Image (cartoon, rainbow, N blue to C red):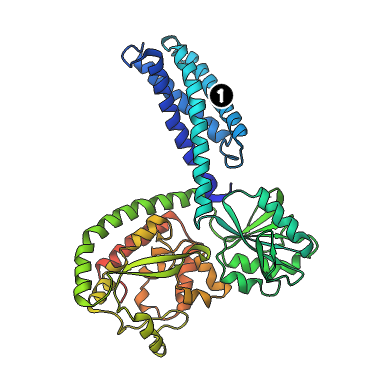
Amino acid sequence: MQGRNKYLIGYIIWGMDMATIMLSFVFATYIRYFNFRDMRDKTTHFYICVLLMLVATVYHYALDYSRDFIKRSFWKEGTAIFKYVLTMVLGTISVAYVLQLAEQFSRLVMFYFTVIDALLMLIIHQVFKSILKTYWKSGDTAVKLLVVAEKENLMPTIRHLQHRIEINYHIVGAVCIDEDLTGEVIRGVEVIATRENIIDKVTALPLDEVFIHTPDISQSDLNKTIEALGDMGVTVHYCIELPSISGSTQVGTFGTYSVISYINGTGRYRALILKRLMDIIGALVGLTLTGIVTPFVALAIKLDSPGPVFFSQVRIGKNGRRFNIYKFRSMRTDAEEIKKKLEDQNEMNGLMFKMKKDPRITKVGAFIRKTSIDELPQFLNILKGEMSLVGTRPPTEDEFEKYNHYYRRRISMTPGLTGMWQVSGRSDIEDFDDVVKLDLQYIDNWSLGLDIRILIKTVGVVIFGRGAS
C-alpha cells in the first residue's frame, strides 16, 4: 500500500483495533463475573485496559503492523494478529507487575480477553478487507495505471503486475514503446498509444500513475516523456533507474520490480487525510445550510423561468475522472445551444467562455451567482469525494479535450468549491492562462494553512459581493 491510502488504512486499522480491545475487555470482564458489580477494583481494571491500548499502539506504529494488511492471506492475518495480541498481553502484564497493578486483577479476565480479542480482531479485519476490495472494484476509486514497455516485455510486465500489484490499482491501458501495436488487447489490457503519440493520448486519459519497464532502451531517450508525464502531475514508476531530471524521487518496489518513482506533487499524505476530514465536516455543515435555503431558492427559480431547480453537468475531476457537478440552475434550459451562437463574443482568452452580460443567465440566476448561492449543492460533490472545499477549478469536458500536458497538471489535485482563482478576483480574469497559473501556484504551494486562508478569504469575497458575475 502506497501514499495516502497507506496512512489512511493504517489509522483506520488502529482505530478498529482500539475499539476491539475495549469491547473485548468488557466482554471478558462480564464473562468472568457475570456482572460489573463484583469486580475487585474497577480502577485497576480501567488502568489495565488503558495499558493494553497503549502497548498495542506502540506495537502498531513501531513495527508498522498494517504495512502488508491488504496482501495478507487469512492465515497470515491470523498469525499477525496472534503475534500482535500476544505481545500486547505480555507487555501489559509486565508493566502491570512493575506498577503493582496485577494483584487486584483477575488472571481469568486476561485469558478470556486474549481469546475474544484475537477472534474478534480477525473477523473485523477480514470484513474490512472485503469492504475495501468491493470499494476499489465497484467504483471509480482505484488508482489508474498505464503500463509502458517494449514489445518483448509488454505481456510479461502486464501479467506480472496483474498478479503482484495491490488491489487498489487498475491497469487502464498499455503503450508499446518500440512497435505500433495500437488496438491490440493483451491480457485484457488495450494498447492505446505508441512512443510517438503517448503524451497526446495520456493528456485526455483518466490516469494517476505510469509504470515504465524498458531495459533495452536508453534512459536519455525517454527523458522528455517522463518529464512531460511529471509536468501533468502523473506519478512515474521507472523500473531499475531513472534519468537525471528534476523533481522528487522515491526508491521502492512496484509489484516486485525495483523502481525509482518520479513524483511532481505533494507527498504530505497525512495532511491530505486531514484535508479530506475537513472536507467531510465542511460538506455536512454546507449540506445542512443547503437544505435550509433550497425551498426558497427553488421557489424563486421556478417563478422566474421554466425548467428544473438543479443543474448537473459532467466535469473533469482529479487526474481525468469524470463526475457530475451539481448547482442551482442559474441559466435558461437551452444555455448550451445559445452558447454556440455567442462564441464570437467570448471575453475570455483561451479555453474558457465568459460574458459579463451573458443573455443565458436568468434574473434569479444573476443574484444566486453573485452571492455564490448557486454553488451550494456542490457540497454533495465534496461529501462524495469528487470535489474538495479548496482546490482547482473543475474544467468541462470540452475544455479538457483541448488541454495540452501543461494545462493537464491543474487537475492533478482534487477540484475545489473555491480556490486561488476565486479569491484572486475570478470575475476580472480575462485569460485562461492566468487561471492555470493560479491553479498551479496553489498545487505547488499547497498546505492546510493555505486552504484555511483561502476559505477565510472566500467568506469575505461572498459577503462583500465579489463573487462570480
Q: Locate residue 240, reporting x and y percent.
A: 74, 54
**Residue 10 in view:** no
**Residue 187 in view:** yes
Question: Residue 422 sits in which quadrant?
Answer: bottom left
Horizontal side, residue 445 vs residue 1: left or right: left
Q: Locate residue 234, reporting x and y percent.
A: 59, 62
Q: Nearer the viewer, residue 176 or 357?
A: 176
Horizontal side, residue 379 vs residue 158: left or right: left
Q: Locate residue 399, reporting x and y percent.
A: 48, 76
Q: Residue furthest right?
A: 216
Mark 1: secondary structure: helix
Residue drawn at x 77%, y 64% as measured from the top left = 151
Horizontal side, residue 128 vs residue 250: left or right: left
The residue labelled by disc 1 is 87
Report the quarter where the C terminus lies. Answer: bottom left
Q: Locate residue 260, reporting x and y percent.
A: 68, 54
Amino acid tagged 1 = Thr
Residue drawn at x 33%, y 81% as measured from the top left = 334
